[in-house]
């Protein structure tokens, strides 16, 4: 891996952390979803591939932060009951702030790109 590739990989990791949280909260804003359902939906977002080993610790952290809650358990034919997650009122407030911030950042990025265009 050359220096540029290494730098971009680190940069993408930093951006991806916050982006994944925002994607998860946005998915839960529409409906309560069990963890595996979230995993499947996230995997259908191009370039956002995520593993179970990354998702479940992130869900746990969001729950400990008071942004999501386990609403109920659903029976699963393939194993233990599935936890169904939903947003808390605080989670909805934080998500609104996150979405606004990403909108502002997108506009800032576009302005910076347009400024440097020939």
Image (cartoon, rainbow, N blue to C red):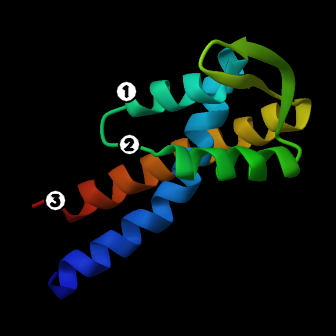
Q: Is residue 43 left or right of residue 76?
A: left
The relative height of residue 35 versus residue 110 in the rendered view (above or below) is above
Q: Residue at x 30, y 80 (%)?
A: 7
| Residue of label 1 | 44
Q: Is residue 38 left or right of residue 48?
A: right
CA–CA distance in space, label 2 to label 3: 32 Å
| Residue 8 found in image quarter | bottom left
Q: Secondary structure at mark 1?
A: loop
Q: Are marks 3 and 1 in contact (CB under 8 Å)?
A: no
| Residue of label 2 | 49
Among numbered discs 2 and 3, the one appearing first in the sequence: 2
The N terminus lies in which quarter of the figure?
Answer: bottom left
Q: Is residue 112 left or right of residue 60?
A: left
Q: Are marks 2 and 1 in contact (CB under 8 Å)?
A: no
Q: Position of residue 29 (x, y in %)?
A: 70, 22
CA–CA distance in space, label 3 to label 1: 33 Å
Q: Are marks 2 and 3 in contact (CB under 8 Å)?
A: no
Instruction: Point out the residue furthest to the bottom here.
Output: 3
Q: Secondary structure at mark 3?
A: loop
Among numbered discs 2 and 1, the one appearing first in the sequence: 1
Q: Nearer the viewer, mark 3 or mark 1?
A: 1
Q: Secondary structure at mark 2?
A: loop
| Residue of label 3 | 117
Q: Position of residue 2 (x, y in %)?
A: 15, 84
| Residue 23 found in image quarter | top right
Q: Is residue 7 left or right of residue 82?
A: left
């Amino acid at each position: 891996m050359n220096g540029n590739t290494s730098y971009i990989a680190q940069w993408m990791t930093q951006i991806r952390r916050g982006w994944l949280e925002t994607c998860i909260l946005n998915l839960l804003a529409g409906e309560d979803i069990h963890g595996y359902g979230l995993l499947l939906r996230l995997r259908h977002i191009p370039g956002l591939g995520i593993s179970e080993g990354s998702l479940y610790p992130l869900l746990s952290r969001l729950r400990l932060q008071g942004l999501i809650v386990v609403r109920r358990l659903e029976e699963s034919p393939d194993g233990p009951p599935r936890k169904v997650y939903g947003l808390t009122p605080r989670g909805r407030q934080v998500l609104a702030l996150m979405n606004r911030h990403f909108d502002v950042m997108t506009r800032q990025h576009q302005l910076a790109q347009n400024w440097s265009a020939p």
